[in-house]
Image (cartoon, grey):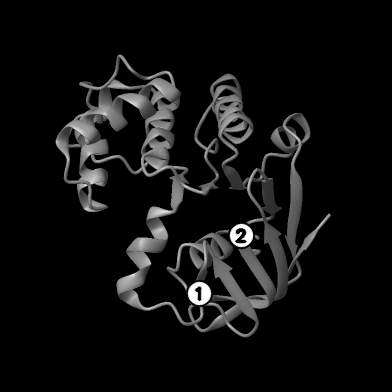
Amino acid sequence: MAIISFQGTDILNGENIVIYGMDMEIEKGDFVYIVGKVGTGKTSIIRTMIAEHRPGKGTATVCGYDLSTIRPKEIPFLRRKLGVVFQDFQLLTDRTVEDNLSFVLKATGWKDRAAADRRIREVLEAVGMETKAHKMPHQLSGGEQQRIAIARALLNKPEVIIADEPTGNLDGETADGIMQLLTRINREEGTAIVMVTHNRDIVEQYPGRVFLCKDEACTAI
């Protein structure tokens, strides 16, 4: 069964349709790129997937939730099944790495402090940042901050990681390290990856299924 399924779905940005009739099926273990020029609807697809935008006509389901009928109180439960990584990291700058991760666990219903601490250690080890738990975000490089953002995305063992230009603010070598990390998570954990990027070199170096957004459409190529 597909983790993410769009069938003839219109993608909206506000009241405006930016993509007409999109078909997209993503299953466990898939690595999918969404590519296209600025303003072609890539980020609107991501926002639809996380239930920030409602879809237009057609059907749209993510992790078993119908995005057309999902209720506001259900959206946090959907988002627990997703790991989202942004270009600009979006770490809380006034607290340590450990406290950033602890904040997410508390917000998603973790009550057992020992279990939460154990999970934080696990995800930091998974991204090679186990020695950085007590650092503040400003004490980390861009690549290290993005690794912490990926650790945050892994906390609730998501079925899919949705990454919006995760290498966009990084130099080539650092971006390569982030891509190696994402492909390892995909391969070893079976976690599906959906990644928006404009970097064709990355797509060529780390092959996956590719959807191109162009002329108000998004189609597999």
* Quadrant in the picture for residue 201: top right
Tell me if residue 68 comes above or below residue 188 in the rendering: below
**Residue 97 appears left or right of 31:** left
Q: Position of residue 207 (x, y in %)?
A: 76, 36
Tell me if residue 182 comes above or below residue 197 in the rendering: above
- Whether the residues at callouts 1 and 2 have beta carbons within 8 Å, the answer is no
Q: Quadrant of the N terminus?
A: bottom right
* Quadrant in the picture for residue 42: bottom right
> Looking at this rendering, what residue extends furthest in the top direction?
131
**Residue 134 appears left or right of 13:** left
Nearer to me, 57 or 142: 57
Report the residue at 23% width, 35% height from top.
116
- Given this view, does label 1 or label 2 mark the residue nearer the observer? 1
Task: Report the amino acid beneath label 1.
Answer: Leu
Nearer to me, 24 or 163: 24
Q: CA distance from mark 1 to mark 2?
A: 17 Å
Crowdedness of circle 1 by 10 Å Cα count: few (<14), some, many (20+)? many
**Residue 67 shows which numbered tag?**
1
Nearer to me, 38 or 125: 125
Query: Quick one: SS at disc 1?
Result: loop
Task: Report the amino acid beneath label 2.
Answer: Lys
Q: Position of residue 70 (x, y in %)?
A: 43, 77
Q: Can see residue 217? A: yes
**Residue 42 shows which numbered tag?**
2
Q: Earlier in the sequence, mark 1 or mark 2?
A: 2
